[in-house]
Amino acid sequence: MSDLPEEFAIIATHFAPLSGEGALNLSDDAAIFTPPKDRELVISADAIVETIHFLPIDPPDLVARKLLRVNLSDLAAMGATPHAYLLTLSVPRTTPKTWFAAFAAGLAADQKTYNIHLLGGDTSSTPGPISLSATIIGHVAPGTALRRTGAQPGDSLWVTGTIGDAALGLLALQGKIPDPTSHLSARYQLPIPRLGLALYGIVHACMDVSDGLLQDAAHLARAANLTAEIEAAKIPLSPAARAADNLQLCLTGGDDYELLFAVPPASEPALLAACAAATIPVTRIGRFLPGPAQLRVLDAQGTPQPQSAQGWSHF
């Protein structure tokens, strides 16, 4: 081990123990992967960057788990079962070995939680900030992947969990708002991917909420060429979010990693049963109507409210 170049020593010490079937102990140029029999692959990639998606003060193990979970959320949005992932790290040369040890420990914890393993990836140095990326691999029965397209007039709009906690959590970690229970900061640092929901045949369209509820609801509306209406008073907020009293940030802040879906009225009982079976709360927040591809936000009186912003932009 001591004769290995620094990069390979880090891989052998911290990341090879995380590898699984097909990874070749991270000793080759690529993995050899055999998909599960009679399943279609679902593949996605997401990156997180220091100061944008996580803070320099965030513990490395939580950063690692957030990286995995934001990618797992993409699989949840398509109804896929997680299988494995690829990892790319770009960190400063001055990064201490203790950071890698803690980061790998976080990966190991969530590998166990979500029954996945590391297939390979890449490491490189950067002057900063830290940049991390994962490519997640899952699988579904042929033809059963959920899609963003497909909402129909008359469908209701539903969302899992609560909205806005993560965006408020960032403010809390920056010392800008109180967070006496640490609920908000925990939701920012450690999202919960809504895996395990059996929604095929129940929902017409589905996606995860990563860039802000309004922006992602608008994506569903555009994909179906419909008008989506959201009733602001029905947005599910946690007690901590209600105490923060910043509905606009909750609607647009992003990082929720909840699921947003279009559901025909006849399927609503099946949706409620599926969410109850998975112990995932769900709330009806609006509807889809014929008309131009647009999003309307209604106040408690049903009056459309102008929105100066809808969510996070990557550029």
Image (cartoon, rainbow, N blue to C red):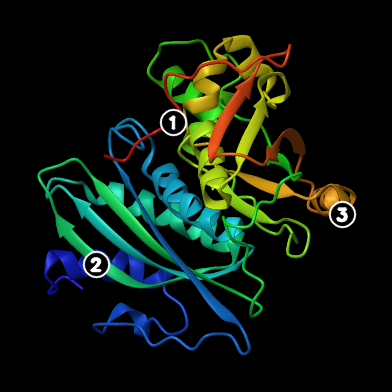
Q: Earlier in the sequence, mark 3 or mark 1?
A: 3
Is 253 situated left or right of 79 in this image? left
Q: Can residue 160 be spotted in the picture?
A: no
Figure check: 177 above or below 157: above
Per the image, the residue denoted by label 2 is: 122
Q: Residues within 10 Å of mark 3 (few under 14, many from 20)?
A: some
| Secondary structure category for the residue under label 1 | loop
Per the image, the residue denoted by label 1 is: 311
The reply to whether discs 3 and 1 touch (Cβ–Cβ < 8 Å) is no
Q: Between 267 and 179, which is closer to the camera in this rendering?
A: 267
Q: Earlier in the sequence, mark 3 or mark 2?
A: 2
| Secondary structure category for the residue under label 3 | helix
Per the image, the residue denoted by label 3 is: 270
**Residue 112 found in image quarter:** bottom right
**Coordinates of residue 203 in the picture (x, y in percent):** 73, 55
Please name the amino acid that badge 3 sits on: Ala
